[in-house]
Image (cartoon, grey):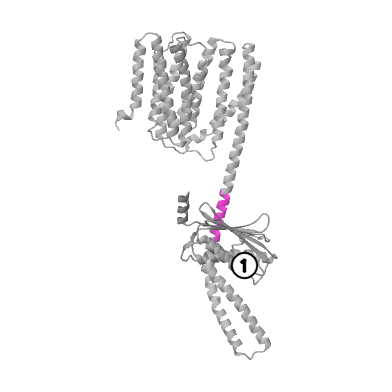
Amino acid sequence: MSLLRRHRWFVAAAGMTLAFAAVSLTSRRSVALAGVSDILGLALMLAAIAAALANSFIRPKHERSFWGLMALGLSLWAANQAGWTYYECILRKDIPDPFFFDIILFFHMIPMIAAVAWRPDLIKKASNDLRLRVLDFFMLLGWWVFLYAFIVFPHQYVISKVDLYNRYYDRLYGIENGLFLVVLGIAISSSSVGWRRLYLNFFVPALLYAVNSQFLNRAAATNSYYSGSPYDIPMIGTVAWIAATVWSARQWDFKRTEPGFEARWSKTVPRTAMLAILSLPLLGLWAVLFDSSPGAVRTFRIYAALTAMLLLGLCVFLRQYAQHQALMNLLRDSRKGFESQQKLQNQLVQKEKLASLSSLVAGAAQEIDHPLTSIMNTSEQLWSEGGLSDQQTALLRKILTHAARSRDLVVSLLRFAQHAPGEKALVDLSVLLNRTIQMVQWRYAGDKLQIEVSINANFPPVWGNVNQLFQALTEIVENAMDALQEAGGGSLQIRAQCHGNDAVLEFSDNGPGIREPLRVFDPFYTTKPVGKGTGLGLSVAYGVIIDHDGQITCQNNPDGGALFVVRLPIAAESVSARAGAV
């Protein structure tokens, strides 16, 4: 792209400014000259508004508030310019002094200050609540409305004094322009290259406009100003420059940066707003005790201070409420993050514990298995030979019984130590659940136990090892049934449903609950009577679920009983099918 095409909007702005300067310097005061000045200024403002509104839609999300506020400020400026155009071009009258549209002109700078103070060039933290920033903006806007009502308005409409009105208006408007330049200066010193270029292209015309406004206002006070005069040349140049900047920004590349020195100024706006609130009673007290203005002016100022205190006090209340809500949300998020981190840490500790124990248990079980096998074989051989007394037969039977129990324990240990991942395929958990329930119900057929199963339709398969998952589900269900059996009866409710991309199984019983839910997955931890449980079943289930990239948790229900929740990731094929169905 050529240099001329790249800067075509600025070239057009410079051309229109030079053309207007030629007309202004070579023409005398007339309605036609006033029309050229007013209409050209209004057209440039409308062009800038159109570009700002377009940017608020096409630019990234974090820039939309900036361009929306800029469009609002330019619209207020254009409304004042439209008032001038209506009076001078249609009514063909001189602009009255005071002029109602001066109020609109005064407030056009507030949204533009807020747009820059919003700092779209900085990466905002998630905790930076939008509601707080909006309330801060309205508090400062209310403060400027109050200042205008307190200082300027009494001399504009309460008791009209044109000289005092012009003096106070010009000073307050100058302060407002100066504040805009300060905010732009701070933004320029702490922004990235792209944003710095944008801020500079607002700063230079704003400085030109601020200086020219003071000369123009003084010329108006001495009746030497007229529309289209050389005083309007900087004003046309300012508007044209701003319009060119807004149009050119559509193709500029803006990159956000982390807050640097700006972090020290992050609380400037809320602190300024609070100082503005605190100054209201002081100004009201000054109006009561020290103001020497006529009674009507003093009364108006007192009422203005009271009204501002009421409205801005309401904003303070809303801000405190919004801040409280933001802090509560932050606390809630922090607690969730801490709980998630704690669960992850517990899972890692449990996994390391199981891994270290597996290697130890595997070696010990194999060493124990050999003498147990010899003891059982020798005992069976003695039994088969006969010729033993009753006492010897009872002792031999006791040896075989305890050896068999020890052999069962060895088998459990080896099963615990050998839960390495096997061959995996698509597994239908609903089929495994039904198989598990049929097997367990047959085992506990004579007890007062019930199992209720609820499986959602189209329950998706998972990717895993059929035998290992069947073993894990069996351990969980048998653990619940043993607890209910010890309690004399009860029911176990099993629910299978989808949560996002997870297949979730919930096992909830109405038994006595678990004494220490955080320890149920520890190896050899059991609350069952001696000889009935090894304390390895749930540890095996835990290892299987973790090896399948899932999660298993345990807790007590508020109404009694235990709740086990198993989460397994849905197979990728099922996730794609569900996404396609949606």
At 41% from the left and 12% from the top, the residue drawn is 34
The answer to whether residue 346 is left or right of residue 240 is: right
Query: Where's residue 221, x and y in %?
Result: 48, 10
> Closer to the camera, 256 or 259?
256
> Closer to the camera, 366 or 464?
464
Query: Where's residue 32, x and y in %?
Result: 39, 11
**Residue span colored magenta:** 337-350
At 63% from the left and 79% from the top, the residue drawn is 401
Which residue carries the number 1 mark? 441
Q: In which quarter of the image is residue 161?
A: top right
**Crowd class of label 1 (few under 14; some 14 to 19; many from 20; radius 10 Å):** some
At 51% from the left and 25% from the top, the residue drawn is 110
Query: Where's residue 85, x and y in %?
Result: 44, 15
Magenta-colored segment: predominant secondary structure: helix
At 48% from the left and 35% from the top, the residue drawn is 261
Q: Which quadrant, please, contains the N terminus?
A: top left
Q: In this view, does 286 lie above or below 509?
A: above
Q: Among all residues in the image, which is located at the extreme right?
A: 488
Amino acid found under the numbered disc labelled 1? Gln
Q: Among all residues in the image, which is located at the extreme left?
A: 2
